[in-house]
Amino acid sequence: MRMAFFFDQSRCIGCNACTVACKDWYGVNPGRVRYRTQTTYETDEAPFFASLVMSCNHCEKPACMTACGAGAITKRSDGIVVVDRSKCQELHSCLTACPFGAPGVADDTQEPVKGNEKWDYSHPMQKCNMCVELLDKGEKTVCERSCVGHAIEVGDYDELLRRHPGAVQVSKDLFPYAYKNNNDTTTNPSFLIKPRKSLVIEGSLD
């Protein structure tokens, strides 16, 4: 099994319900670290704008895991990429390795508690873990159940492809605005997108 995200651009209304619910569920204080982001991008062709909601894409070949010299990032048998913050040594190599900018490191304002018994460094890396504690209990992720437009689904990669004809894997060619840090296209992200199509308006306003 390979767990993945599916996102329907036509259903997303940019309300940020998923990003807010995610931060609330995990107690992420206001600051630069966000497990999930929503951005609206302008394009040169119809439909002229597109919303993109992303988190960690739990890649088949995670660049962050390869770059981590502390062994803090691992991949579960179901494909979910998790970080053990107690092993993080604040090397920050994962931040530049991830092409999607998913890993985050807080500052003293966002994460004011230092010397936590769970880790030796002030601000170990943190990111989306695909709500493993919920999935392991057979429950939906926070982002999926909070999405008012039903634009987000989480499930087996192949099953999501079967259920959603027209969905494609996020790639540099089709979604260049999804990439943040570099041009690495070899990670094989577990993120499927159904692209937004133009709205067809029939009739006249006269």
Image (cartoon, rainbow, N blue to C red):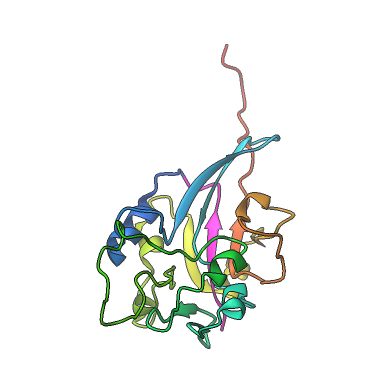
Residue 64 x %, y %: 57, 74
Residue 165 x %, y %: 65, 61
* 8 magenta-colored: yes
State which region is magenta.
1-12
Occupied quadrant, residue 83: bottom left
Residue under the point 60% across and 58% down:
193
Q: Is residue 195 left or right of residue 92?
A: right
Above/below status of 18 relative to 205: below
- The N terminus lies in quadrant: bottom right
Residue 107 x %, y %: 36, 60
Residue under the point 31% across and 58% down:
110
The single residue placed furthest to the top in the displayed view is: 206
Above/below status of 19 relative to 5: above
Closest to the observer, 114 or 149: 114
The single residue placed furthest to the right in the displayed view is: 173
* 59 magenta-colored: no
Above/below status of 79 relative to 165: below
Q: Is residue 132 left or right of residue 81?
A: left
Residue under the point 55% across and 71% down:
94
